[in-house]
């Protein structure tokens, strides 16, 4: 890579004037185009503090070998020149816009002798009036079919039109009065053009005039007792009204504007535009943006306005945007020049326009989500991403299984962590796991990461050792009754009856007898990714070293998406901007963050809604609701005797005594509300089972880490794991097979 100091302009050589500059690589290709109010200040900012620049900008400067500039008179001229150069050179480090698909337009070919209505895609041509774009071609055809009753404009291709003239016979549309049939001389060229112009006027928003005219003609025909003509005019008016219903009224009748909104992440952005004409949404269009430079939403707005309206797009009187561009005045002057009239760029703060902008933003978010889904599902793309990660991190093999860990808390409370798994570049939600942090109090991501990695890989080692023992016994034919019993327990666990893979210390076989595959934690990952920088990476590596598992690669993904930290390295690894490997790493981090946040919110919700009745065995939501409905409040229920409680339908004498004991114990201070997990606290025995009130239940559903027989009397719910659901009171198994997405064992979202 080049050293930016080698081509830095000499002091005083750059003018203090508006202008446009270009960075070029060693082959002379333009790799970046920018504009500036002051060329001197802007270019100096690139070379004054290289280390303080964003990694993307550093990469651009190291790729370039020289810079040149052009001085202009005004900021508007600078904008015009920047947009034209971006379009001409397509620089790799500028923001790139690309259609997420080719949108169809409704076109009227006014440049022909007999104009026709058609669906058109691609480049626009002079002399053709365009309406849209529309999301689907069928939407155009539905609208046209309704309007042809009133405006019977030609829709046939030139070949069909020519043949009809030769044989002097119209097509089917001519016979059903949906075409004025100029091909056979029913109307002359002037009359047909008038129909086409009326069609365009209606589509442009001048709708009231035509509906009122048809209504007057209908009433006149009825008064003259021309009932057939009146009925036909009535049907014509209804057709126009149905066409208008397809275009919802969102603003005032006299408002023409484009509404633009973005949905973005650190690598890409989706932009959606709604075209409002005459107060109605006439069309919609979308793009996907590669953010190959560090840009804000305001910068995206400025780039977008110049590029989209520089392609011949009709400029409206008003443009609604989510953020005002940095050079709003200059951009407004440029758009006004292209429109031939004033253009207002504004950010709506309230009212209907603000609501419409939020609707467009939701559409942009959905478009970005769909784009990511399509991109993630491509096999070739996933393979390339894994190869790029392997090469960047210098791994021995492609990371076919990647585990990513994230910690979530709110001011040090309800600290939880998540583990998400990607196999072959795709999310495996059935493999997801979540953890309630036990040993760490307060906000300490480093120690939390150490605890989570330790617990996860303790379980891996236990599964590995158990698999080795089972293989050795099978080889010598020494399978014992105990191992058979353990296998049977594993079968029950695999169907959700006390899921052994989900709790510390419970028996679990190395192979799931249902699928024949190794159990979840018997699979070691090729790569462990933690959310954070060097401290978090060091903590994860230290945990693996302490367990004697040094063969698993570790890296950290910092908040700045381009920085990947390896253990012991002083500088991060920078994946190329726009690379599939970087995109995959981003998806990993986002998914781990989403899963951790979801669990954290569940924990907080349980803590906030905990009740003194939650810990009473056999008392579910329906019975609790019946009790509160009968007594009216918890205070009255607390004052009731067991006999009074037993009067509630569905509450037996024994349950009533348990309820009274629980409530009185809470009042006297001998008990209290249950923990956030919604289960009574009870120490674990050496078998990893929790015992409370004579019932047995699982102490931890969502945490699958630790060693059998954890000592120390850890309470069943104090670790923050999900309350047990796999066993009913008295130890009887309950529930059924787990859901396919892993929701039964905490594996799914």
Image (cartoon, rainbow, N blue to C red):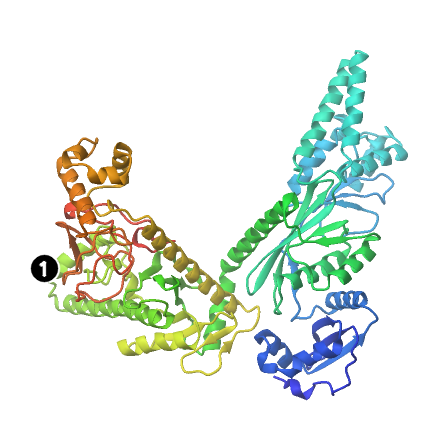
Instruction: Note whether 439 is above or below 196 in the view shown.
Output: below
Any part of residue 474 in sight: yes
Q: Quadrant of residue 523?
A: bottom left
Name the residue rendered at 17%, 45% in the picture: 664
Q: Is residue 419 left or right of residue 388?
A: left
Instruction: Note whether 551 is above or below 10 in the view shown.
Output: above
Q: Quadrant of residue 393?
A: bottom left
What SS does tag 1 mark?
helix
Comparing 238 with 176, the one in front is 238
Comparing 372 with 9, the one in front is 9
Mark 1: give few (<14), some (14-19) or many (20+) Cα within 10 Å. few
Q: Quadrant of residue 184?
A: top right
Q: Position of residue 659 (x, y in %)?
A: 18, 42
Name the residue rendered at 69%, 34% in the picture: 244
The tally of labels here is: 1
Q: Position of residue 500 (x, y in %)?
A: 22, 57
Q: Is residue 638 left or right of residue 137?
A: left
Any part of residue 154 in sight: no
Q: Position of residue 144 (x, y in %)?
A: 72, 36
Picture quarter with the N terminus: bottom right
Q: Position of residue 93 (x, y in %)?
A: 65, 71
Comparing 620 with 624, the one in front is 624
Q: Is residue 718 left or right of residue 131?
A: left
Name the residue rendered at 17%, 41% in the picture: 660
Residue under label 1: 481
């Amino acid at each position: 890579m080049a050293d930016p100091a080698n081509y830095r302009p000499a002091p005083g050589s750059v003018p203090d004037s508006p202008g446009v500059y270009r960075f070029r690589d060693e082959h002379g290709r333009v790799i970046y185009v920018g504009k500036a109010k002051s060329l001197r200040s802007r270019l100096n900012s690139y070379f004054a503090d290289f280390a303080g620049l964003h990694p993307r900008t550093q990469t651009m400067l190291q790729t370039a070998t020289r810079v040149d500039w052009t001085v202009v008179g005004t900021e508007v001229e600078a904008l015009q020149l920047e947009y034209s150069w971006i379009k001409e050179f397509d620089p790799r480090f500028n923001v790139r816009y690309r259609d997420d698909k080719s949108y169809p337009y409704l076109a009227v070919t006014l440049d022909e002798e007999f104009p026709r209505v058609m669906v058109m895609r691609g480049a626009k041509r002079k002399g053709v009036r365009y309406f849209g774009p529309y999301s689907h071609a069928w939407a155009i055809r539905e609208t046209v079919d309704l309007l042809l009753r009133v405006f019977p404009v030609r829709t046939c291709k030139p070949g069909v039109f020519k043949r009809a003239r030769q044989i002097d016979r119209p097509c089917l549309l001519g016979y059903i009065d949906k075409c004025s049939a100029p091909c056979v001389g029913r109307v002359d060229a002037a009359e047909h053009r008038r129909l086409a112009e009326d069609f365009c006027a209606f589509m442009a928003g001048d709708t009231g005039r035509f509906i009122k005219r048809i209504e007057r003609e209908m009433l006149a025909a009825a008064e003259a007792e021309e009932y057939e003509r009146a009925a036909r005019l009535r049907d014509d008016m209804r057709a126009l009204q149905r066409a208008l219903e397809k275009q919802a009224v969102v603003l005032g009748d006299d408002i023409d504007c484009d509404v633009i909104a973005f949905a973005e992440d650190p690598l890409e952005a989706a932009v959606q535009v709604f075209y409002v004409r005459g107060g109605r949404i006439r069309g919609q269009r979308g793009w996907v943006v590669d953010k190959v430079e560090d840009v804000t939403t305001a910068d995206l707005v400025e780039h977008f306005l110049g590029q989209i309206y520089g392609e011949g797009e009709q400029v409206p009187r008003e443009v609604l945007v989510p953020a005002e561009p940095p050079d709003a005045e200059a951009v407004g002057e440029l758009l006004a020049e292209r429109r031939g009239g004033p253009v207002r760029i504004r950010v709506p703060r309230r009212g209907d326009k603000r609501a419409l902008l939020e609707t467009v933003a939701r559409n942009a978010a959905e478009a970005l989500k769909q784009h990511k889904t399509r991109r993630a599902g491509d096999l070739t793309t996933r393979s390339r991403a894994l190869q790029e990660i392997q090469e960047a991190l210098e791994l021995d093999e492609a990371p076919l299984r990647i585990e990513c860990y994230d910690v979530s808390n709110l001011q040090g409370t309800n600290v939880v962590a998540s583990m998400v798994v990607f196999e072959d570049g795709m999310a495996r939600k059935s493999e997801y796991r979540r953890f309630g942090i036990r040993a760490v109090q307060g906000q300490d991501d480093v120690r939390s990461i150490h605890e989570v990695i330790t617990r996860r890989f303790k379980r891996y080692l236990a599964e590995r050792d158990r698999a080795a023992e089972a293989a050795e016994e099978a080889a010598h034919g020494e399978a014992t009754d105990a191992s058979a019993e353990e296998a049977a327990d594993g079968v029950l666990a695999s169907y959700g009856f006390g899921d052994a893979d989900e709790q510390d210390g419970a028996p679990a076989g190395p192979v799931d007898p249902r699928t024949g595959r190794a159990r979840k934690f018997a699979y070691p990952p090729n790569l462990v990714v933690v959310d954070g920088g060097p401290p978090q990476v060091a903590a994860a590596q230290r945990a693996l070293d302490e367990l004697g598992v040094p063969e698993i690669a570790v890296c950290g993904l910092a908040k700045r998406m381009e920085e990947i930290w390896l253990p012991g390295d002083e500088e991060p690894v920078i994946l190329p901007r726009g690379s599939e490997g970087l995109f995959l790493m981003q998806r990993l981090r986002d998914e781990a963050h989403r899963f951790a946040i979801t669990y954290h919110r569940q924990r907080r919700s349980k803590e906030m809604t905990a009740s003194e009745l939650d810990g009473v065995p056999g008392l579910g939501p329906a019975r609790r609701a019946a009790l509160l409905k009968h007594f009216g409040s918890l205070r009255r229920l607390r004052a009731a005797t067991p006999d009074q409680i037993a009067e509630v339908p569905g509450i037996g004498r024994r349950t009533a005594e348990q309820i009274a004991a629980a409530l009185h114990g809470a009042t006297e201070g001998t008990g209290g509300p249950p923990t956030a997990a919604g289960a009574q606290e009870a120490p674990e025995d050496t078998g990893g089972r929790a015992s409370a009130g004579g019932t047995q239940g699982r102490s931890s559903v969502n945490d699958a880490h630790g060693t059998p027989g954890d000592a120390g009397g850890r309470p069943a719910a104090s670790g923050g794991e999900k309350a047990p659901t796999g066993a009913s009171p008295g130890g009887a198994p309950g529930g059924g097979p787990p859901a396919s997405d892993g929701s039964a064992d905490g594996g799914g979202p």
